[in-house]
């Protein structure tokens, strides 16, 4: 079956008692045992909950993996994955990384003796140089947030297999609708399902997918032992969001492509970072390994002073952190999402004070352009010494 059909039908044929088309929320932590030594398959909801199980089976199947695990946030999912590693272990990680992941590695995992080296994961020579005897995994985001750098997943996974280390892919920005890293050789997928999978800026969740029996069993143990699991209500909300993922991603991509092309021609914009644009260095790899583009991109203004005015004048587009929801949001990474990354690293990768990130929603594209155009005009007039609006 095509992925659109599988998405729309998540949980719809799993409830055998009443035939409920929408899978019920099993708001129960404990499950009665039929008799000594027997279980319905459910004992205690940290270990397994029927509503969460439907979600976990769905994401495993969508990502072509063997097992899925639903966590209370994307960060909880990452922490659960990092619990695979021990004191002295080393990771190789994408240089342009989600700020929270960087913070978890540098301020928490480092205290437990797990270290990380940040490299351009598209550069196999850099991977080779960063590799140590103690390296256990490569963690990549592709495209990265906010600079949209694209990494060749298959090339990294092949390299990692040769070294006997795991390939972990943060697939938040593309979702299995557009990119399936396990099919390209990855071992573990992590999602901030708070973003496109949930899709409505209303549920915080993380998902893990593993490939292979041994790894899946280890992750099951960690997920249950750590306990940062997703509750049944949020599992249900997430599944409801996922049913419309295909439609939403199509509109996100169409809107983002139209607006990115328009911004490329705008006299106040220095550069637009979006892999759907032929001018983007990752354009070809993106086309090779995914069936489309995400709905977020970033752009650099020629003059940083315009940013404050733009953020004050956008109305339909909300000035807010996060991404991936039906509502358009604009973020200023240098002071928000990426503030925990040291200035020297931010400047090295280009997350400077001229950069804005735009998570394009599913509103009408004309309304979004009108909103942006008005904010740009206000900024142009303030820069030209006009009256403050
Ligand atoms: C948001 C995000 C995370 C963290 O997920 P939360 O659900 O906010 O905990 C991790 N990786 C990426 C790429 C993200 O965008």
Image (cartoon, rainbow, N blue to C red):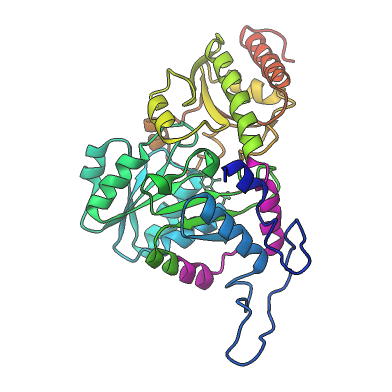
Q: Which residues are magenta?
A: 219-245
Answer left or right for 266 relative to 66: right
Question: In the image as oriented, which residue stretches furthest toward the front?
Answer: 1
How many badges with numbers are in the image?
A: 0
Q: Against 360, is 380 above or below?
A: above
Pinpoint residue 348: horizontal percent, then vertical percent.
37, 31
Q: For the point 45% across and 65% down, which residue is it?
A: 219
Q: For the point 63% across and 41% down, which residue is it?
A: 245
Q: Main secondary structure of the magenta part?
A: helix
Pinpoint residue 231: horizontal percent, then vertical percent.
66, 63
Pinpoint residue 336: horizontal percent, then vertical percent.
57, 38
Question: In the image as oriented, which residue stretches furthest toward the bottom?
Answer: 36
Pinpoint residue 25: horizontal percent, then vertical percent.
74, 63
Q: Viewer-proximal residue, 312 or 314?
A: 314
Res. 302 in view: no
Q: Does residue 238 belong to the magenta stretch?
A: yes
Q: Does residue 241 belong to the magenta stretch?
A: yes
Q: For the point 38% across and 24% down, which residue is it?
A: 281
Q: Against 208, is 156 above or below?
A: above
Q: Against 252, is 45 above or below?
A: below
Residue 215, image quadrant: bottom left
Answer left or right for 52 relative to 187: right
Res. 124 in view: yes
């Amino acid at each position: 079956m095509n992925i659109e059909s599988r998405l729309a039908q998540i949980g719809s044929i799993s409830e055998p008692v009443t035939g409920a088309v929408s899978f019920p929320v099993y708001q129960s932590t404990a499950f009665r045992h039929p008799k000594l030594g027997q279980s319905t398959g459910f004992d205690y909801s940290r270990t397994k909950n029927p509503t969460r199980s439907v979600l976990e089976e769905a994401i495993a199947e969508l990502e072509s993996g063997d097992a899925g695990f639903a966590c209370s946030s994307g960060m909880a999912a990452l922490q659960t994955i990092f619990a695979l590693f021990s004191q002295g272990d080393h990771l190789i990680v994408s240089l342009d990384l989600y700020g929270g992941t960087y913070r978890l590695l540098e301020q928490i995992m480092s205290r437990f003796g797990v270290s990380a080296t940040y490299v351009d994961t598209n550069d196999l020579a850099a991977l080779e140089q960063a590799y140590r005897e103690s390296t256990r995994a490569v963690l990549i985001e592709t495209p990265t947030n906010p600079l949209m750098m694209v990494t060749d997943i298959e090339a990294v996974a092949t390299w990692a297999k040769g070294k006997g280390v795991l390939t972990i892919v943060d697939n938040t920005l593309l979702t299995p609708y557009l990119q399936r890293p396990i099919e390209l050789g990855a071992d573990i997928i992590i999602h901030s399902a708070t973003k496109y999978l949930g899709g409505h800026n209303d549920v915080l969740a993380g998902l893990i997918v593993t490939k292979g029996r041994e790894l899946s069993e280890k992750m099951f143990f960690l997920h249950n032992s750590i306990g940062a699991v997703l509750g049944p209500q949020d599992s249900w909300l997430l599944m409801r969001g996922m049913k419309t993922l295909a439609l939403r991603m199509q509109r996100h991509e169409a809107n983002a492509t139209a607006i990115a092309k328009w911004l490329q021609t705008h006299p106040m914009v220095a550069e637009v970072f979006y892999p759907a644009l032929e001018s983007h260095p990752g354009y070809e790899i993106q086309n090779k390994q995914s069936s489309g583009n995400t709905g977020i991109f970033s752009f650099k203004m020629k003059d940083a002073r315009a940013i404050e005015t733009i953020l004050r004048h956008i109305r339909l587009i909300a000035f807010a952190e996060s991404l991936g929801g039906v509502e358009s949001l604009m973020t200023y990474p240098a002071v928000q999402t990426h503030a925990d990354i040291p200035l020297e690293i931010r400047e090295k990768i280009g997350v400077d004070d001229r950069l804005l990130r735009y998570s394009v929603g599913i509103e009408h594209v004309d309304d979004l352009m009108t909103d942006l155009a008005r904010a740009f005009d206000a900024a142009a007039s303030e820069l030209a010494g006009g009256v403050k609006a």
